[in-house]
C-alpha cells in the first residue's frame, strides 16, 4: 500500500538531481570541484563525508574531494583554507562541523575565512547576512533541503504556524528566515523554552532538531500537522531513530519524515545545487524551482485542524 504520509526524500532528490544533470549537460561548460574539510576523530562525520562524495559525484559528475586531518592548528587550517580560496579550480569549500575542542573557540573566524563565493555550506557571516536581508546567496543545505521537500509535497507555507525546535546557525536560524520568506509565522524554540509541548502542539509544521532521541511524541503534535525530523541516531540494537518517536506521532501527522532517507538525503542534494550555484550562477535557482515543480506529488488543502489530502 502506498504510504501517503511518509515523505520520501530519495524520490524527490532523484527528480532534483535529474533536473540539475539536464541543465549541466546542456551547458557543456566543464566540471566544478569542491573541497570538504574534516578534522579530528569524528567517525560519523567521516562516514557522512564519504556519503556526500559518492552521491554528488554519481548524480552530477561534479568533483568532490574529502580532505581529513587528525589534528591541525588554527593557523595551519587558515592557511589551508587560504590555499583553496586562491585555487581557481575550486568552486566550493565546506568545513565539517563540529570542530575539535581546541578549534571550536575559533569557529566563526575559521568559517569567515572561506571565500564568500565558495561558501557552499552557506555558513559564513556574509552568507548568513544575505539570507536575513533577502539577497541572493548560499543557503545552508539542511534548511534549504527542508523547504524544497515541503514545496515538493505542495505544503502551503503561506500563513502556516511553524515551530522550529533548534536555534543553531546550521538549522534553526536560517530555517526561520526561509519560512519567513514564504510568509509563514515562525516560533523558534530551544533548551530554555518554557511549555515546549504547548507551543509545538499548536503548530501546522514542527521541525525537530533538538538532539534528543525520540523526545517528540504525539503529545507535541496536533492532528494534521507536518512533522520534519532532523535527528538521526543508532540504538544499541542498530535501529535508526530520530528526535521524533515516529510510530507514536505517525497517526496524528498529515506528513512525516522518517529518520533515514529524507532530510539527510535532501541536505546532500542541496549541497550539489550550491556547488552548481557557485559555478553556473543564479540560474541554478530557477533549475531548482523547476525540479521542485516536477517533483510535486499531491495537492493539499489547509483546514482549521491542519492539512488534509
Image: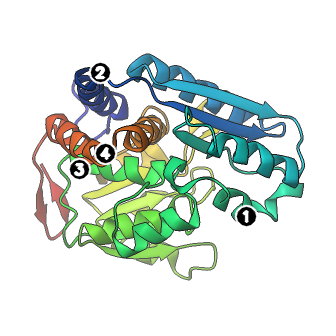
Judged by depth in the image, the label closer to the viewer, 1 or 2, is 2
Q: How far apart are marks 4 and 1 (CA)?
A: 32 Å
Q: Which of marks 2 and 3 is nearer the N terminus?
A: 2
* Res. 77 visible in picture: yes
Tell me the quarter of the picture where residue 236 sits. top right
Q: In this view, does 81 lie above or below 219?
A: above
Quadrant for the N terminus, please.
top left
At horizontal 21% and vertical 37% (from top left) the residue drawn is: 291
Can you identify the residue that label 3 sits on?
A: 151
Q: In this view, does 106 lie above or below 19?
A: below
Circles 3 and 4: CB atoms closer than 8 Å: yes
Dot 3 falls on a residue whose secondary structure is: helix
Judged by depth in the image, the label closer to the viewer, 2 or 4, is 2
Dot 4 falls on a residue whose secondary structure is: helix
Label placed on residue 149: 4
Question: How are the residues colored?
Answer: rainbow
At horizontal 63% and vertical 73% (from top left) the residue drawn is: 191
The spot of residue 78 in percent (x, y) is 78, 51
Label placed on residue 28: 2
Can you identify the residue that label 1 sits on?
A: 109
Dot 2 falls on a residue whose secondary structure is: loop
Question: In front here: 97 or 207?
Answer: 97
Q: How far apart are marks 2 and 3 (CA)?
A: 30 Å
Q: Distance between the residues labelled 2 and 4?
A: 29 Å
Does residue 59 appear left or right of residue 116 in this picture? Answer: left
Dot 1 falls on a residue whose secondary structure is: helix
Q: How many marks?
A: 4
At horizontal 30% and vertical 26% (from top left) the residue drawn is: 24
Q: In this view, does 86 lie above or below 168?
A: above
Q: Which of marks 2 and 4 is nearer the N terminus?
A: 2
Question: In front here: 195 or 159?
Answer: 159
**Residue sticking out furthest to the bottom:** 194
Amino acid at each position: 500500500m502506498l504510504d501517503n504520509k511518509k515523505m520520501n526524500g530519495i524520490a524527490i532528490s532523484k527528480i532534483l538531481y535529474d533536473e540539475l544533470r539536464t541543465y549541466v549537460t546542456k551547458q557543456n561548460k566543464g566540471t566544478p570541484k569542491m573541497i570538504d574539510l574534516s578534522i579530528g576523530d569524528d567517525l560519523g562525520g567521516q562516514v557522512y563525508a564519504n556519503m556526500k562524495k559518492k552521491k554528488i559525484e554519481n548524480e552530477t559528475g561534479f568533483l568532490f574531494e574529502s580532505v581529513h586531518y587528525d589534528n591541525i592548528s588554527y593557523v595551519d587550517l587558515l592557511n589551508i583554507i587560504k590555499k583553496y580560496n586562491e585555487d581557481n579550480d575550486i568552486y566550493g569549500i565546506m568545513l565539517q562541523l563540529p570542530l575539535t575542542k581546541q578549534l571550536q573557540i575559533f569557529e566563526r573566524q575559521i568559517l569567515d575565512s572561506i571565500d564568500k563565493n565558495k561558501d557552499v555550506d552557506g555558513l559564513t557571516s556574509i552568507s548568513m547576512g544575505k539570507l536575513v536581508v533577502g539577497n541572493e546567496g548560499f543557503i545552508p543545505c539542511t534548511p534549504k533541503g527542508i523547504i524544497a521537500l515541503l514545496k515538493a509535497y505542495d505544503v502551503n507555507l503561506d500563513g502556516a504556524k511553524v515551530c522550529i525546535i533548534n536555534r543553531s546557525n546550521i538549522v534553526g536560524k536560517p530555517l526561520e528566515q526561509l519560512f519567513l520568506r514564504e510568509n509563514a509565522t515562525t516560533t523558534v524554540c530551544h533548551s530554555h523554552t518554557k511549555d515546549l509541548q504547548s507551543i509545538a502542539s499548536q503548530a501546522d509544521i514542527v521541525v525537530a532538531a533538538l538532539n534528543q532521541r525520540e523526545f517528540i511524541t504525539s503529545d507535541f503534535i496536533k492532528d494534521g500537522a507536518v512533522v520534519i525530523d532532523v535527528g538521526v541516531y543508532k540504538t544499541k540494537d542498530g535501529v535508526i531513530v530520530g528526535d521524533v518517536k515516529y510510530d507514536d506521532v505517525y497517526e496524528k501527522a498529515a506528513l512525516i519524515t522518517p529518520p533515514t532517507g529524507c532530510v539527510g538525503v535532501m541536505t546532500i542534494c542541496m549541497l550539489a545545487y550550491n556547488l552548481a550555484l557557485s559555478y553556473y550562477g543564479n540560474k541554478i535557482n530557477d533549475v531548482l524551482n523547476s525540479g521542485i515543480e516536477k517533483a510535486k506529488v499531491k495537492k493539499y488543502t489547509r483546514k482549521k485542524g491542519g492539512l488534509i489530502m
